Each structure stands twice: as structure tokens, then as C-alpha cells.
Image (tube, rainbow, N blue to C red):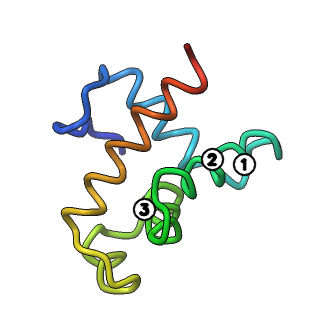
Amino acid sequence: MFKKKRGIRLSYYKQGLVYFLCANFHSLPKSYRDLICKLCVDVGGADSDALFALLTKPEFSVSGISIKFYVSEKKLYNLREKFYLEFWERIFK
């Protein structure tokens, strides 16, 4: 179930679009998968694997991903916000 993220300055519908595209990563065409992967690397840098897991595996919790990848929860939230904003800028503007 999608719930609007409070810290992200996009509307509910824009956030939902980004969320559901990432949540269905494995069902997307290769061009979209490549775009999401590249954007994760651009935004996440060394923590791109943690960001990718956060975005494409909605069944995992932020705390679980934080522990698995040794990244603070606060950093994951900040990376997710940057990803959403950058995704919207690159794709739809």
C-alpha cells in the first residue's frame, strides 16, 4: 500500500507514480530498469545498493535495509527524497 512520504516535496500522485514504477522494477522494460539503476548510482554513490533495495523492495523495512547495508536510516530517507525529486526532474520535465 502506498502512503505519501512527508519529507518529499512532490504531490501524492507524483510520489505514487515513482513509487509504483520502482516497486514493479522487474516488470519494467529494460530502458526503465537501466534508468532506475543509473539514477540510484548517481544519487546514492557508495550507498546505491541500499537505495536500490529501499526503492525496489517495498516489503523490506528501512531499518532492515539500514542494518543490512550499514547505512543510517536518516541517510536512506534523504537518499530516497533526492531520488524521487531527481527521477521526476529527469523523466517528466
Residue pointed to by mark 1: 33
Query: Residue shown at 49%/26% (left/top)?
Result: 88
Residue at image coords 38%, 86%:
68
Q: Identify the residue shown where x is 54% and y is 49%.
A: 23
Q: What amino acid is at disc 3?
A: Leu
Q: Is residue 85 left or right of residue 24?
A: left
Q: Mark 3 or 1 closer to N-term? A: 1
Q: Quadrant of residue 84?
A: top left
Q: How many numbered discs?
A: 3
18 to 80, vertically: above or below: above
Residue 67: image tag: none
Three-letter amino acid code at the position of disc 1: Arg
Q: In this picture, is 53 found above or below 29?
A: below
Q: Nearer the viewer, mark 3 or mark 2?
A: 2
Q: Quadrant of residue 62?
A: bottom left
Hey, which quadrant is residue 31 in on the image?
top right
Q: In the rendered structure, which amino acid carries the disc numbered 2? A: Ile
Q: Quadrant of the N terminus?
A: top left
- In the image, residue 92 lies at what x, y percent? 57, 17
Q: Nearer the viewer, residue 72 or 14?
A: 72
Residue assigned mark 3 = 54
Q: How busy is the neighbourhood of tag 2: few (under 14 within 10 Å), some, or many (20 plus)?
A: many
**Residue topped by disc 2:** 36
Disc 1 crowd, CA 10 A, few/some/many (<14, 14-19, 20+): some
Q: Would you say the residues marked 1 and 2 are in contact, meaning their CB atoms lie under 8 Å apart?
A: yes
Marks 1/2: CA–CA distance = 5 Å
Name the residue at the right extreme. 30
The residue located at (54%, 54%) in the rendering is: 40
Q: Quadrant of the C terminus?
A: top right
| C-alpha span from label 3 to label 1 | 15 Å
Q: Which sits in the foreground, 6 or 70?
A: 70
